[in-house]
Amino acid sequence: MAREDPQIIPPELLLRAYRAGIFPMADSRDDPEIYWVEPRMRAILPLDGFHLSRSLARTLRRGRFRVTCNQAFDAVIDHCAAPRPEAEESWISGRIRESYRELHRLGAAHSIETWMTGADGIERLVGGLYGVGFARVFCGESMFARVPDASKVALAWLVAALRRGGGELLDCQFTTAHLESLGSRELPQADYLALLAHAARPWEPGERSLYCGGASSTGASSSAVSGAGSLLALGFGALAQDAAAAGSSSSPGNFIAQSLTQTS
C-alpha cells in the first residue's frame, strides 16, 4: 500500500471537499495542521452580476496590464501567502501551498496573472489570483495586488473567461468590502450547495465546444494559456482568440471591458 505524502492534503480528498462545499484553512503560515471550513453564509460572485466600474473599465481599455492564465501559479500563491499590512497572519500555510501546487500540476488549480512593465523596461508580476476549478465551478481562493487595480483586472478576466467557457458558479467563500464592490453577494450555505450541485453536473458530449469552439492552449493563445482542457484555460484561450478576431489584439483589455459592459 503506497504511503501518501504527509506534507500535502491528498488531491482526491481536497477535490471531494470542494465538491461538498468545504475547503481547508490554517491558523498561520507555519501551522502544520489544517481545519475544514463550511461557512454558514457563503459569498459568490454571480457571473452576470460583475460590477465593472467606470474607473476599472478605463484601466482595462488602456491596456496597462498584460494578463495571462496558468503562467506563474507558484509565484501567485507565494504572493497571496506573503504577510500583508492589513492582516497579521496568512491562512495559506506551507502545507496548503504544496497541496495546491499539486492540484495545479494535476490540472485542477489555476491562476490568473497581471503583469506590468516598469520604467526600467522590466515586466513584473504585480497582481493575480488562484483557485480550484471543476465542471462549471471555480472556487476562488485568494488574490493579491502590488499596484492599484491589478487584482481587479485579474478578477475581470476571470469572470469573462468563465462566462466564455460556460461557467456557472464563482465561489468567493467569504465576503469582503472589496468583493462586494465588484458584485459579490452572500447566501446561506444550503442555497450555495444547491447551486454547486447543479454547476458540478457532468458535461454533455460536445457541450464545451459550444462555448469555446476550437480554443485550446495552442495557436493564438499559446503564450498566455496552459492547462488545456480546463474550463478556465479554454475560456481564457477563447477570449484571446475573440479579441484578436475583433481587432483588439493591441489591447485585449478593451475587448474584455466591452464584453463585461454588455453583460453586467
Image (cartoon, helix red, strand yellow):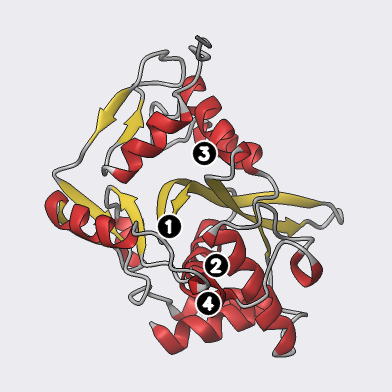
Q: Amino acid at mark 4?
A: Tyr
> Relative to 162, does residue 42 appear above or below in the rendering?
above
> Of the residues under marks 4 and 1, which one precedes in the sequence?
1
- Mark 4 lies on residue: 211
Q: Where residue 51 sits: x, y (%)?
A: 37, 74
Q: Is residue 160 visible?
A: no
Mark 4 vs mark 1, CA separation in Å: 13 Å
Q: Amino acid at mark 1?
A: Ala
Q: Amino acid at mark 3?
A: Cys
Query: Alpha-carbon neighbours of circle 1 within 10 Å: few (<14), some, or many (≥20)?
Result: some
Q: Where residue 166 sits: x, y (%)?
A: 46, 71
- Choose mark 4 or mark 2, whichever is in front: 4
Could you tell me which quadrant the C terminus lies in?
A: bottom left
> Of the residues under marks 1 and 2, which one precedes in the sequence?
1
Tell me the element at label 1: loop
- Mark 1 lies on residue: 135
Would residue 55 appear left or right of 18 to someone viewing this image?
right
- Mark 3 lies on residue: 80
